[in-house]
Amino acid sequence: MVLSDKRILEEIDKGTILIEPFAKDCLGSNSYDLHLGKYLGCYKDRVLDAKANNKIEIIDIPLDGFVLVPGVLYLAVTEEYTETHKHIPFIRSIVSATRLGINIHCTSGVGDIGFCNTWTLEISCVHPVRIYRGMPIAKLIYHCIEGEVEQLYNKKQSAKYNKRTMKPVESMMWKYKF
């Protein structure tokens, strides 16, 4: 079940959902619009290694925008910091960004209950497109969960993305044991 706008507001009042900054005009009938933060990340190496800590270069998006080019994976960050303590957050691209050929994630659009941070987006594009900090880029949709949660993400020792940040975060695949 997806939460409605009224239910999202109720959960914000209860403290089970936090969105900072929050603007009521970003609340849709069943979602909340997120905006592109001021930083992008690009991997420094052309070949990435799943067992290595692949470093990224941070780019400050200029006020006059930044042109994304096809064939490059960009890591971006949302302006909004969110906390979700009772529901499953799903992040989706907004239609207007998709219609410009911007993809915000491949398949990792599901967050964990207890995720407390900004969202790192895996952005790619179909053809060159200029993006701007502060532009609407994604939406959060909240789903109910069946049953009790034993361990929230932000309490999990092995959680890889708990450090609060305003910059995009590179893959932590290298922390897995394989």
Image (cartoon, helix red, strand yellow):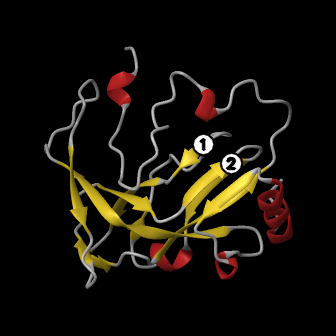
Amino acid type for the residue under numbered disc 2: Thr
Image location (x, y in percent) of residue 107? 50, 47
Return the x and y of residue 23 as percentages of the image width and height.
64, 76
Q: Disc 1, disc 2: CB below 8 Å?
A: yes
Residue 75 placement: quadrant: bottom left
Quadrant, the C terminus: top left
Name the residue nearer the viewer: 118 or 47: 118
Query: Quick check: can you spot residue 128?
Result: no
What kind of element bears circle 2?
Answer: strand
For residue 158, side relative to residue 53 (left or right) = right
Task: Give the CA distance from mark 1 to mark 2.
Answer: 6 Å
Residue 37: give x, y in percent of width and height.
Answer: 40, 67
Total numbered labels = 2
Q: As rendered, which of 42 and 71 lies closer to the eye? A: 42
Q: Which residue is mark 1?
A: 115
* Other-residue count near label 2 (Cα within 10 Å), few / some / many at <14 / 14–19 / ≥20: many
Q: Outermost residue, bottom direction?
A: 64
Question: Residue drawn 83% across and 55% down?
Answer: 14
* Residue in the image at 80% along x and 66% along y: 9
Residue that numbered label 2 is attached to: 84
Q: Amino acid at mark 1?
A: Phe
Q: On the rendered structure, is 90 left or right of 163?
A: right
Q: Residue furthest top?
A: 178
Q: In the rendered view, would you say 113 is above or below 32?
A: above
The image position of residue 175, as x and y in percent, is 37, 23
* Residue in the image at 81% along x and 47% along y: 144
Sequence-wise, the earlier of marks 1 and 2 is 2
Examine the rendered structure and indicate whether residue 147 appears above or below residue 123.
above
Label 1 element class? loop
Q: Which of the 4 quarters of the picture holds residue 133?
A: bottom left
Residue 176 in sight here: yes
Please tell me how crowded label 1 is: few (under 14), some (14-19), or many (20+) other residues with Cα within 10 Å.
many
